[in-house]
Image (spheres, rainbow, N blue to C red):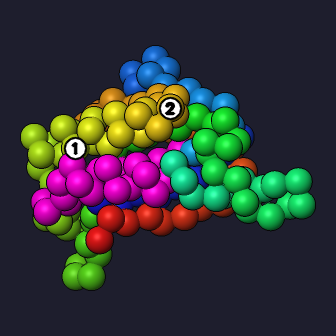
Amino acid sequence: MRVVLQRSKSASVTVDGAVTGAIQSGYVLLVGITHEDTEKDADYLAGKIAQLRLFEDEEGKMNRSILDHGGEILSISQFTLYGDVKKGRRPSFIAAARPETAEPLWLAFNKALQRYGLVVETGVFGAMMDVQLVNDGPVTILVESK
């Protein structure tokens, strides 16, 4: 699994003109899943993300996790994170898991985050989505399970 994590001051996702998820301070997670991923990968990434220290403490050092900070998560499935552009001019998505594999793992990942007590808002799996965010920092981290 591959997650692009962006610390945000606010964010929302809209599908067909309707907001499906919105958060205030927290993380926007763009979540890519490949063929070999399992629930073990989802659990690992949820724990890693919940405990990463990406928020500043009183001294301005990144020393606080989202659990300490009290932030929320906006999780968005994004198969294009496994796009391969090494050959040609059009990406190949052969490394991305098929929807019947990816969707249950994305849902399991979101539930694993919720088990840490995090509020998790989402986009809609497989939909064309408009994502808006106010990036905080900016802080953008790539987190992978393998």
Identify which residue, 103 or 56, lies in the foreground.
Answer: 56
Could you tell me how far apart the alpha carbons at marks 2 and 1 are, in whole angstroms?
19 Å
Query: Which amino acid type corresponds to the residue marked 2 in the rendered image?
Result: Gly
Magenta span contains residue 31: yes
* Residue 8 visible, this orientation: yes
Task: Assign the C terminus to one quadrant of the image.
Answer: bottom left
Residue at figure coordinates x 47%, y 38% from the top left: 116
Residue at figure coordinates x 41%, y 34% from the top left: 115
Which of the 4 quarters of the picture holds residue 27?
A: top right
Residue 117's label in the rendered image is 2
Q: What span is in magenta?
A: 28-49
- Pointers 2 and 1 in contact (C-beta within 8 Å): no
Q: Earlier in the sequence, mark 2 or mark 1?
A: 1
Magenta span contains residue 58: no
Identify which residue, 63 or 19, lies in the foreground.
Answer: 63
Tag 1 residue: 105
Check the image and report above or below for 49 versus 116.
below
Label 1, residues with CA under 10 Å away: few <14, some 14-19, many ≥20? many
Q: Is residue 95 left or right of residue 74?
A: left
* Residue 133 visible, this orientation: no
Which of the 4 quarters of the picture holds residue 44?
A: bottom left
Residue 114: image location, x then y, percent: 43, 33
